Amino acid sequence: MPGSAGRSGGAKPGRRTRRRRGRRLTTVDETSAGGLVVDAERRCAALIGRLDRHGKLLWSLPKGHIEDGETTEQTAVREVKEETGISATVLSPLGTIDYWFVADRRRVHKTVHHFLLEAYGGELSDEDVEVTEVAWVPLHELDTRLAYADERKLVRKARELFHETAAADEAAD
């Protein structure tokens, strides 16, 4: 096509390509933990909202970096408290999500360990500088509110755990 560079032939003579040879991104691994914190009585979950680079508010599960000496469970409890203001205890593991992104001239492989947590105190707070908003969201709205498909999948797994627990409780009665 006139005026456009072909995909098979590379750049036209005299044009510079955007690829810079010899400059490779450093690849790093990062590990975080967090999860789905629920208030069972209110049938809600605490979510955090962050602005993306386009200014759109994206809702997600609270999570953050593991500090030296912490277990993933301890990190999940700490990050939930820091990002939402809610004190919670870990009920069970939900799963692990991993993904890639580029930031600060680095290619990052991020692994996030998620847990199902139960709220027992605290008040919602968006004081964490990384968080734009926090909200209690009804459990039935999580599929439409959460921005990321992998997190929606974890919420479905949590629902299965709730149903198993409810069935076990009924059987015990």
Image: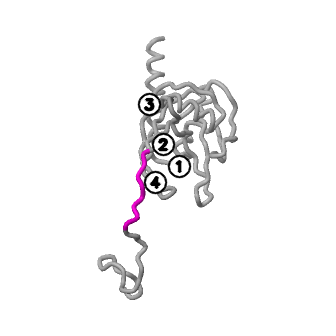
Q: Residue under circle 4?
A: 101
Q: Amino acid at mark 1?
A: Ala
Instruction: Tell me whether circle 4 and circle 3 mark residues in contact (CB < 8 Å).
Output: no
| SS type, badge 3 | helix
Mark carried by residue 151:
2
Q: Residue under circle 1?
A: 147
Question: Which colour assignment does the render follow?
Answer: one colour
- Distance between mark 2 and mark 4 Cα atoms: 17 Å
Question: Label 3: few (<14), some or many (≥20) within 10 Å?
Answer: few
Q: Residue under circle 3?
A: 160
Q: Is residue 153 left or right of residue 124?
A: left
Q: Amino acid at mark 3?
A: Glu
| SS type, badge 2 | helix
Q: Amino acid at mark 2?
A: Glu
Q: Residue at x 53, y 32 (%)?
A: 75
Magenta segment boundaries in residue numbering: 22-29
| SS type, badge 4 | strand
- Distance between mark 4 and mark 1 Cα atoms: 16 Å
Q: Residue at x 48, y 27 (%)?
A: 162
Q: Is residue 49 inside the magenta stretch?
A: no
Earlier along the polypeptide chain: callout 2 or callout 4?
4
Question: Label 1: few (<14), some or many (≥20) within 10 Å?
Answer: some
Instruction: Tell me whether circle 2 and circle 4 mark residues in contact (CB < 8 Å).
Output: no
Question: Label 4: few (<14), some or many (≥20) within 10 Å?
Answer: few
| SS type, badge 1 | loop
Instruction: Tell me whether circle 2 and circle 1 mark residues in contact (CB < 8 Å).
Output: yes
Q: Is residue 91 left or right of residue 11?
A: right
